[in-house]
Image: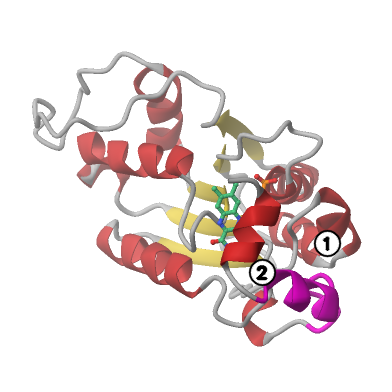
Amino acid sequence: MDRREFLKVTGAGMLTLFLSGCGTLMAPKQGKATIQVKPGQVSGGKKMKIVVITSSPHPKNESTSIYLADRFTAGAQKAGHEVFTFDAANSSTHPCRGCDQCHMDGPCVFKDDIENTLMPKMLEADLLVLTTPLYYFGMSAQLKTIVDRFYSRTGRLHGKKSILMATAYNSNDWTMSALVDHYDTLVRYMEWQDAGKILGIGCGSRSLVESSDFGNQAEQLGANL
Ligand SMILES: Cc1cc2nc3c(=O)[nH]c(=O)nc-3n(C[C@H](O)[C@H](O)[C@H](O)COP(=O)(O)O)c2cc1C
C-alpha cells in the first residue's frame, strides 16, 4: 500500500492535508513541540552523550523524520554535545525472540548491530532520541524492533533522558495520540525523563516538513539542551 492508498483508506486524509497544509499553518495543539525544558536544564550545562535512533526506510535526503533528526543533531552538536546516530532501517537487526537467555541483563543471543554497536552507545548515553515516521498511528516496526531489544538491558537503561520525534501525513489533533501514549508509558517504565517531543503532523513529504516550523523546533531543542 503506498502513501496515496493509505490516505484513501483513512478517509479524509488528503482533504485534511489540502485544507490544513503542513502542521504549522493551522497547527493543532498536538502538532506543536512540547519542549518542556529551559535552556541548559536537561544537560545541567555539561556536554552530553546523545544517541539518535532513526527508523525510516526512506533515503536520508527524502525522509521527513530523518530531516527532524538531522536538524536536532545540528543544534545539539553546535551546543557541543556528542551525537551518535543509529539507522535502524539499514542496519542488521533482529526482533527479540523472547528466549530470555539475557535474563533482562544481557548479553543478547543476537550478535547484530543492535548488540554490537547500538547497545554499548545507549548504555553510556545520557540522552536517547527516538525518531520515527508514524506507521498506523504507532512507531515504525524498525524502531519497535530496537525498543523490544531494550529487554536485554532494561535495568541498565534506566535513568536516561529521552526525546520523541515523529512525522505523519495526517494533521488531525489525534494523529499522534497513540504514539505519544506509548512513548509516555515507555518513559515511565524505563524510568526515563522526557526532555521533549517534536510531533510533525501534516508532514508527509520532504517539502512539507522543510516548509514547516518543526525543523526549527527540532534544532532549537538540540541547541537548548
Ligand atoms: C506503512 C505506512 C504507514 C503509515 N501510517 C500512517 C499513519 O498511521 N498516519 C499518518 O498520518 N501517516 C501515516 N503514514 C505516512 C508517513 O507517516 C509519512 O509519510 C511520514 O512523513 C514518513 O516519514 P519518513 O519519510 O521519515 O519515512 C504511513 C506511511 C506508511 C508507509
**SS assignment at label 1:** helix
Considering only order in the chain, which callout, 1 or 2, is on the residue closer to the N terminus? 2
Q: Who's the residue at 64% across and 36% down the image?
A: 82
Using the image, tell me which numbered label, if any, was put on residue 113: none
223 lies left or right of 196: right
Q: Position of residue 181 (x, y in %)?
A: 40, 71
Q: Are marks 2 and 1 in contact (CB under 8 Å)?
A: no
Nearer-the-camera pick, 142 or 126: 142
Q: Who's the residue at 57% across and 49% down the image?
A: 131
Q: Is residue 119 visible?
A: yes
213 lies left or right of 197: right
- Snapshot quadrant of residue 40: bottom right
Q: Quadrant of the C terminus?
A: bottom right
Using the image, tell me which numbered label, if any, was put on residue 170: 2
Amino acid at dot 1: Asn
Q: Is label 2 within 8 A of ligand 1 (CB to nearest ligand atom)? A: yes
Residue 44 lies within the magenta run: no
- Colouring method of the image: secondary structure
- Snapshot quadrant of residue 165: bottom right
- Snapshot quadrant of residue 42: bottom right
